[in-house]
Amino acid sequence: MRVVVPFDATDPKTRLAPVLSEAERSDFAAAMLGDVVSAVRGAGHDPVVLATEPLGERVVDAPVTVDDRPLSVAVNDALSGAAASTPVAVVMADLALATPATIERLCSGAGDVAMVPGRGAGTNALVVSHPDFRVDYHGTSYLDHLRRARDIGASVREVDSARLSTDVDEPADLTEVLVLAEGDAPGWLRDAGFRLAVTDGRVEVVREG
Amino acid sequence: MRVVVPFDATDPKTRLAPVLSEAERSDFAAAMLGDVVSAVRGAGHDPVVLATEPLGERVVDAPVTVDDRPLSVAVNDALSGAAASTPVAVVMADLALATPATIERLCSGAGDVAMVPGRGAGTNALVVSHPDFRVDYHGTSYLDHLRRARDIGASVREVDSARLSTDVDEPADLTEVLVLAEGDAPGWLRDAGFRLAVTDGRVEVVREG
């Protein structure tokens, strides 16, 4: 299956700015992208990176398509050939906890549209087998996508995966990367000095200098 | 399978105090407990509520055992009869997104110990089929439980479920309840005036009226 991995190559992971410099955010985002691409390959599918600009020195083991239009426009272009015989998957590049098994679970099973809701009503991953389904990633996109599917008579399969529902946006999300991720991203964080710390019974991430 | 549902009946959900009064927290916690009990019953299992004190006016469709000792002590007592032939499951009472299908996925499958990691390295649910496994819910309990299982030679199955990995502790978690929960808890929140709102592309929960 063709799996499109949208990647903000221009100014990635701005909400991590409190804990990572601009160069670090670029590096860390590339490590997560690499982990997602590996998980997709491990599940036997073909990843294509959909980047907002050329990746430059950041190397990834997948073909890269550059499209600087807004995310939803670029993804809808990629979905335009989707059909029951040729489904297209879209998996965000910051799903650092993805594994081949979770990608396989996403990509197999019934439903004209399979979706992984992200925290905060986002849509972290989907598989589209219906020619008329289109995305709109603004706001409560998961609810909007449910409505869109209903409007066009497409059946929906909810994929219940903690690993794929965890997108890494904010400093608190780094905890999940250190606890559960299995690719290069957790190693990158550890090399950068990030550690788990328990304060008053709550777990947080600290950076050692 | 016997499914133990620990419930803090004394002062539940203290981290929701910024948005709910003490009486409301008690009501909302009872609604979530009821939803978890329903999901367990829907999966064909037998829930037992393990409460820190009698439930009083809060009604739940399950037998209630009162044990005011610390959580880990009380749960370990409940686990003392666990074995391959008589597994015991422990499912937290604030997993408001639980459904019969997710509980079924937790309770079926291989592994001496099946676990659902919660956000922040907690352990939201587990199934124990090994007589020597014990819990310790303090701090990074998921990592501690992985270690404990390795120490006693118990095999581990990670259950990858967004619904079960979402425990409702903080105001931000209410978003997930409104978006994905299917029991009484989301209705309770709506009746109390809670709504989703989108501000600058981010989704949050607001309270009206």
Image: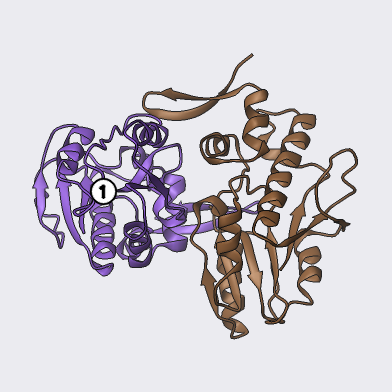
Chain colours: A purple, B brown
Residue A183 percent across, percent down from the top left: 32, 65
Please rate how many residues cluster around mark 1, counting C-alpha atoms within 10 Å: few if below 14, some from 14 to 19, many from 20. many
Q: Quadrant location of the N terminus of chain A?
A: bottom left
Q: Amino acid at mark 1?
A: Ser
Q: Residue at x 90, y 41 (%)?
A: B56
Decide: is A156 above or below A35: above
Front-most of A42 and A109?
A109
Chain ID of residue with mark 1 = A
Kindly tell me whether residue A208 is visible in this rendering: no
Front in this rendered view, residue A158 or A195: A158
Which quarter shows the C terminus of chain A? bottom left
Disc 1 designates what residue? A129
- Give the side of residue B67 with respect to residue A28, left or right: right
Tell me: B97 left or right of A65: right
Residue at figure coordinates x 28%, y 58% from the top left = A36
* Position above or below: B165 against B208: below
Q: Quadrant of residue B18?
A: top right
Q: At 31% from the left edge and 58% from the top edge, which residue is drawn? A: A107
Which of the 4 image quadrants contains residue A161? bottom left
Secondary element at tag 1: loop
- Where residue B88 sits: x, y (%)? 71, 70
